[in-house]
Amino acid sequence: MTLPPTTEATGDRVRLPLRAGLEGLEPYGAPQLDVPVLLNVNENPYPPSDAVVADIADAVAKAAHGLNRYPDRDFAELRSELAEYLRAESGVSLRPEQIWAANGSNEVMLHLLQAFGGTGRTVLSFAPTYSMYPEYARDTLTGWVTGRREQDFTLDVDHVRAQIAEHRPAVILLASPNNPTGTALDLATIEAVCEAAAESGPTGPDGAPTASVVVVDEAYGEFRREGTPSALTVLDRYPHLAVSRTMSKAFGMAGLRLGYLAAARELIDYLRVVRLPYHLSAVTQAAALAALRHRAELMSQVASLRAERDALVDWLRGHGLRVAESDANFVLFGLFDDRHQVWNGLLERGVLIREVGPEGWLRVSVGTPQETAAFKAALEEVLGW
């Protein structure tokens, strides 16, 4: 057998030409265990109703009749409906051409770094934050740099400005609410970052500076507390700002895999360059459109989850634990000398949460009242309350 020059045979084995930097790495993923109470991956605990399921099934069946044809490459109808949803949810009017969508917000982020990152460029974020961000950078051969968050997990604007000036990033990734802490950014901070990023990007072919693309990841945006505005409200002032959302969380459609983004049309057009042809299947488009027709029903669960979250925060604090302020559908709490022991004790009692974030902290998703009660009872046993 003749092998390519970048592989070598050892006995009956072949060494594959793995890209440098990927050696020994494991695929991303939270533990998937079969236990009664799953509160580890920030899912909406309420499944879609029979009416929603029936509408999605009907829409998919109709789409199936045309599966011999490629889907709408630019999914015009879906972009229009997503724009209408954002108008209703955030009060911001957007044109369909300002909307982009992909297979989960993961692929949206990948498109952003494919378009604006790459060899010799840098993406900047502030830790602790979403653990997938450095993987997006790695997969697009983009440098990864992190600044710090404060003790309360907010951002110090002067520190952010200094990091931007030092690293001149092509992309700045800001999660709001932040994962795993639940911390939302105020508009003043977002505006300050956008102002600092206006000419802080890599030098262009003509030698002139470019902007850094500021991405505000609002995957959990619908869960924000009253009075916490969306970054969408300043989108029209900053052509280098992009705001991403998902149907996985508030919509309870994690299995659908539909993420989307709002930005200036020019920015969206650059994402269209790097996306694979027909990346959103006809089935995905049909199911997403059907779900959006039921947005009032699906979103009605958000208020109850917010209330459940706030009550859980009060309960944890009432027992003397430290709890990060949360505008998401999860709560970061601690501090524990041995957080793994607490995590494992909960698991032994049938409750799976997430061992993530800074040392000593644990994260629990907001579940149904019954799931929250099971979590509380298990935690009381583990901590001997």
Image (spheres, grey):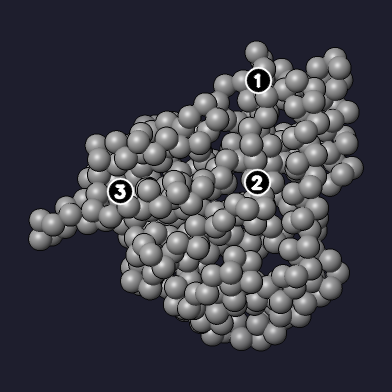
Residue 303 drawn above or below residue 137: below
Query: Crowdedness of circle 2 by 10 Å Cα count: few (<14), some, many (20+)?
Result: many
| Residue type at the position of mark 2 | Ala
Q: Quadrant of residue 319?
A: top right
Q: Quadrant of residue 354?
A: top right
| Residue type at the position of mark 3 | Ala
How many numbered discs, if any?
3
Q: Position of residue 205 (x, y in %)?
A: 13, 59
Q: Residue at x 83, y 39 (%)?
A: 372
Most foreground residue, 367 or 353: 367
Q: Residue at x 35, y 34 (%)?
A: 159
| Residue type at the position of mark 1 | Leu
Q: Position of residue 383 (x, y in %)?
A: 81, 17
Q: Read off the residue under disc 2.
A: 328
Counting residues from the start of the chain, the first of labels 1 and 3 encountered is 3
In the rendered structure, the answer to whether residue 325 lies left or right of residue 377 reads: left
Q: Is residue 377 visible?
A: yes
Q: Read off the residue under disc 3.
A: 196
Which labelled disc corresponds to residue 129? Answer: none
Element class at badge 1: loop
Residue 385 drawn above or below residue 221: above
Q: Position of residue 371 (x, y in %)?
A: 85, 41
